[in-house]
Amino acid sequence: MKPGRTKTTLYAIANRVKMGKKVEKSLKEKNQSAVSQDEDDPNKTPEPYNCTGNFQADFTELCKRNNMAVIPPVVHRARPPTSQSQVESSKPEKGKEKGKTSAQQQQSEAEPDPELLEGEPVEQPPKTFVLKEKFEYFKPSVQVEMENYDKPDTVTEIFIRGWKIDETMMATFAQCWPVMEKLHTINLWNTGLAGETLTMMANCIPNIVNLRTLIVDGNCVEAENWHELISEESPLQNLSLRHCGITDKGAQSLGTAIGSVKKVNMKLISLNLAGNMIGDLGAEHIAMGLRMNRTLMSLSLASNQIKDKGAIKLGEVLSRFPLSHEEVVERRKQFSEKGSPDRNKSPPPSRRADSKDRPGSVRSSSHADKDKKAGKPSGKKKDGKGGKDAKEEEKHDKTKGGKKEKEEKGGQKKGSAASIAADTKTAGKGKGKGKDKGKGPAVQEVEDAGASDFVNPLTDAADFIDGQLLVAGNRVLINLNLSRNCIGEHGLAALLKAMQYQTTLTHDSKSSGTGLMRIGVYKNKVSTDSEVLAKLTEFMMPKDPFYKPPPQTPDGDSNS
């Protein structure tokens, strides 16, 4: 022990050292416990993820947040291999290696340089295939087509084939797809969709602004709620439901979604229902939808179970059909609304007592009251002469007013177009602070009339025959495929009659179109030597847009 140091001082120093170590240990333990609590707290809600439009990054991150055991990779859709010269010419020199797909890189690596053997060149392996690992083709993946492979946010098409999409996966897609601005096609083949996942996708579709084509072939849904895909908010123009096990129940809901008296789908252009189990009842429901629909242009009912009854109903819709009671009521409603467009508007202001069209007693009394208030002498005199003069003046004013009104009405009837043009000119010249002040009522009426392009088919000209009101049928549908069904002679005869009626129908119909241009009726319950089949084929052949007439003989007239 050094001199000057006592035992008490040494004891105090030792206590300070121990206390310092204890403080450091306590601080470390607190930090570790706080970190462990943040990591192990299951009740803490993570921050919501905002999708950026980069499908690969968004899809991977959302799958991780959903704790998926297997995350399907996002790959480019396989294409037929091309030669190396074409690949080099199609891409810039700087981005050659970056722009190559994995398949092309494997192909370039697998192709060895040609070696010379005994002076003769060795044949290179064919370029029609790419070697892959075992079972790699069957692994789940999301194939994409891109507008520009250098920009990951330009995905235009998505292809998913051969693996099941459950509710968690569909919820992930429902977050990614609406943000993708270039996406216009979704193809889900044999993905095991159910009624719940189909509803989730139907709710997501209206948010995908540029989506136009949806292909969900090979998905048998027991609920058959396919009609949810073509709701009023859906932007779909092309829908393919091949081999989905659709029965008459699903066809009924689809027919109602295509068109009814209350609402009509005005966006769907093509509908493919081939390879299902639709019978005569389902064909009748689809025909009911075609009564009001004037947008659908292509319909495929090939490889179903349609017989003569269903074909007759389809032929009836294409030629002309009798209106039901509900349709007659709607027709009268449409005409009444068209005849009185100002019915729902507010009534005009009431005419004042000093109007010239009012009776003289009311007019004179109102003027007398005004004159009394103003202190002016009234028009009546004691000798009664004033009353006669007033009556004569009123008669004179009435005759003048009547003549003026007749002249104004006649001028409007004769020169209505000129009056509208004059109104538009004066409206354009009017200077106002507001933008809408320069528009006259005539301009607004023209704009309102052009805003609604859809013409209700019930307002077409009708014929009253045998106690029924007949209206011209659907002439907007140009392609109908009824091949590989059970249609017989009677059904084909009804279709032939409908085609003949379409050609003879006048073009006075407001909702008229070109009529059916292609019809497929092959491989039905009709022999190839049938006269009806031959007539129908011969009748429809010149209408086909791809039809080429046979070349003329040298002896024939070229100008005929």
Image: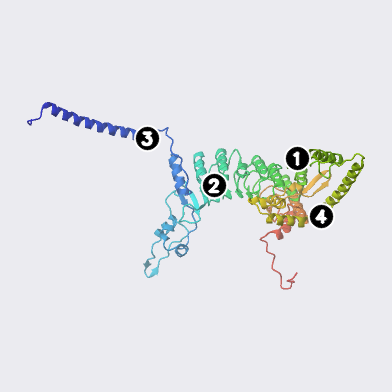
Look at the image and tell me whether residue 250 can be seen. yes
State which quadrant residue 428 falls in: bottom right
Q: Mark 4 falls on what kind of element?
A: helix
The residues bearing labels 3 and 1 have C-alpha atoms spaced at a distance of 65 Å
Which three-letter amino acid code belongs to the residue tagged 3?
Asp
Of residues 466 and 510, the one nearer the viewer is 510
Q: Is residue 482 visible?
A: no
Identify the mark nearer the N-term, 3 or 1: 3
Q: In the rendered picture of this protein, how many numbered marks are placed on residues?
A: 4
Circles 2, 4 touching at the beta carbon (< 8 Å): no
Which image quarter is the N terminus in?
top left
The numbered mark at residue 411 is 4
Q: Earlier in the sequence, mark 2 or mark 4?
A: 2
Which of the two discs, 1 and 4, sits closer to the camera?
4
Instruction: Tell me which numbered mark, 1 or 4, is placed earlier along the sequence.
Output: 1
For disc 3, the marked residue is: 38
- Give the Cα distance between marks 2 and 4: 64 Å
Taking depth in this image into account, of 351 and 124 the one nearest to the observer is 351
Q: Assess disc 1: are there few (<14), some (14-19) or many (≥20) residues with their C-alpha within 10 Å of its C-alpha.
A: few
The circle drawn on residue 326 is: 1
Q: Quadrant of the C terminus?
A: bottom right
Quadrant location of residue 124?
bottom left
Residue kind at label 2, given as amino acid type: Leu
Q: Residue at x 43, y 61 (%)?
A: 125
Amino acid type at circle 1 is Glu
> Which residue occupies the extreme left position in the image?
3
Dot 2 alpha-carbon crowd within 10 angstroms: few under 14, some 14 to 19, many 20 or more:
many
The alpha-carbon separation of the residues under discs 1 and 4 comes to 42 Å
**Circle 2 residue:** 188
Label 4 sits on what residue type? Answer: Gly
